[in-house]
């Protein structure tokens, strides 16, 4: 699966699973290594770096920013093989940070 196709489907799934969330595609030219997507949901947020597969290479600084943002709220690398696991963890994080999660797809 192409990375862009995966991310497009992921954005739709995020909006369905977390009704009312805002999904922002971050500019990769702004800060090298920032995750692709910022998901704003209630009082919290998550950052996701989409990859086409589990073994897709990481670009410079991506590991640093995903780790740093995960310490702040929630951030992860997401790809088809771990998508459900990451979305479940993201939902738990949202709940822990005070969001009222109303899952639209589970």
Image (cartoon, grey):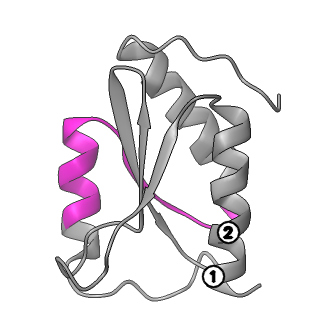
Taking 94 as reference, is 81 left or right?
right
Residue 63's x, y, as percent? Answer: 27, 70
Q: Residue at x 56, y 28 (%)?
A: 91
Q: Is residue 71 magenta?
A: yes
* Rendered image quadrant of residue 94: top left
CB contact under 8 Å: marks 2 and 1? yes
Residue at far right of view: 106
Near mark 2 (Cα within 10 A), the count class, few <14, some 14-19 or many ≥20, is few
| Residue 91 vertical placement versus 49 (above, below) | above
SS for callout 1: helix
Q: Which residues are magenta?
A: 65-82
Taking 35 as reference, is 49 left or right?
right
Q: Residue at x 24, y 55 (%)?
A: 67
Front residue of 43/87: it is 43
**Residue at the disc numbered 1:** 4
Residue 104's x, y, as percent? Answer: 78, 27
**Residue at the disc numbered 2:** 8
The tally of labels here is 2
Q: Residue at x 52, y 23 (%)?
A: 92
Q: Is residue 88 magenta?
A: no
For marks 2 and 1, give the CA distance: 6 Å
| Residue 100 vertical placement versus 5 (above, below) | above
In the picture, the disc for residue 104 is none
Residue 69's x, y, as percent? Answer: 23, 49
Which secondary structure dominates the residues rendered in magenta? helix
SS for callout 2: helix
Near mark 1 (Cα within 10 A), the count class, few <14, some 14-19 or many ≥20, is few
């Amino acid at each position: 699966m192409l990375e862009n196709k995966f991310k497009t489907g992921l954005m739709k799934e995020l909006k369905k699973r977390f009704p009312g969330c805002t999904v922002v595609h971050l500019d990769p030219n702004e800060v090298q290594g920032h995750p692709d997507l910022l998901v704003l949901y209630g009082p919290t947020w998550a950052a996701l770096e989409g990859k086409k597969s589990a073994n897709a290479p990481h670009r410079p600084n991506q590991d640093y920013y995903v780790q740093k943002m995960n310490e702040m709220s929630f951030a992860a690398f997401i790809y088809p093989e771990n998508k459900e696991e990451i979305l479940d963890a993201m939902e738990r994080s949202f709940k822990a940070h005070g969001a009222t999660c109303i899952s639209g797809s589970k």
